[in-house]
Amino acid sequence: MIRVILAEDQAMVRGALASLLDLEPDIEVVGEAATGEEAVAVVERVRPDVALLDIEMPGMDGIAAAAEIRDRVPGCRVMILTTFGRPGYLRRAMEAGAAGFLVKDSPARDLAVAIRRVLGGERVIDPGLAAAALSAGPNPLSQRERDVLAVAADGATIADIARALHLSEGTVRNYLSSAIQKTGARNRIEAVQRSRLQGWL
């Protein structure tokens, strides 16, 4: 049996996925989680073959959870299943060690097939998203620029961002200016919106 855990913050969606997978003769759902932190804890506890993670979860998102799982339980293969087919998400997920990336509007039967393929050592990526990621190119933002934009997203002031990231206010201004320029935005709010739309944040 292929042992799978599901991490999805919407209980109804999680339940539907579990029911679908339980119909497969060779797949067993052995754990569920509603947050990225819970997903890591469940994986450490039950040691599944495959962890199926949503990206958008409260607290630690699916991409951060994928990286944690890869570090703590290297034998577990991670798949990302998301509503948001954004090229930047795909690139970040692959960098975090995900072996599969599917969007939620894929046919249900494709999910079980993808799980088997991932367990067999393949990388499984939604073809439309793979093409979009190639044409979109790499994330232009540095890690520090992403950090600054992520804090700025909640409406933080320059001083707030500086305190949160242990940087000088001048350095924060420089990172924000650079991020605004790279995203072709007019201001930091627009830079945050564009970066989120592309999946860079």
Image (spheres, rainbow, N blue to C red):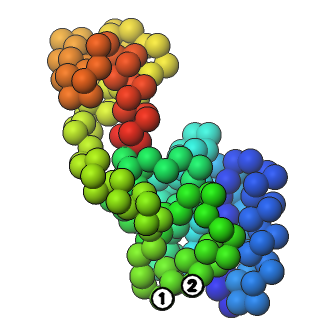
The correct choice, above or below, for 19 with respect to 167 in the image is below
Query: Residue 120: which numbered mark, if any?
Result: 1
Image side of residue 86 versus residue 3, left or right: left
Q: Name the residue under label 2.
A: 116
Three-letter amino acid code at disc 1? Gly
Q: Which of 37 and 186 is in front in this view?
A: 186
Image side of residue 109 versus residue 198, left or right: right
State the residue at coordinates (82%, 70%). 19
The correct choice, above or below, for 54 with respect to 188 in the image is below
Can residue 23 be spotted in the picture? Answer: yes
Quarter of the image with the N terminus is bottom right
Do the residues under discs 2 and 1 have CB atoms within 8 angstroms? yes
Image side of residue 149 versus residue 69, left or right: left
Q: Measured from the top left, where is residue 53 in percent x and y?
A: 58, 59
State the residue at coordinates (74%, 75%). 21
In which quadrant of the rendered view does residue 142 lie? top left
Q: Nearer the viewer, residue 122 or 165?
A: 122
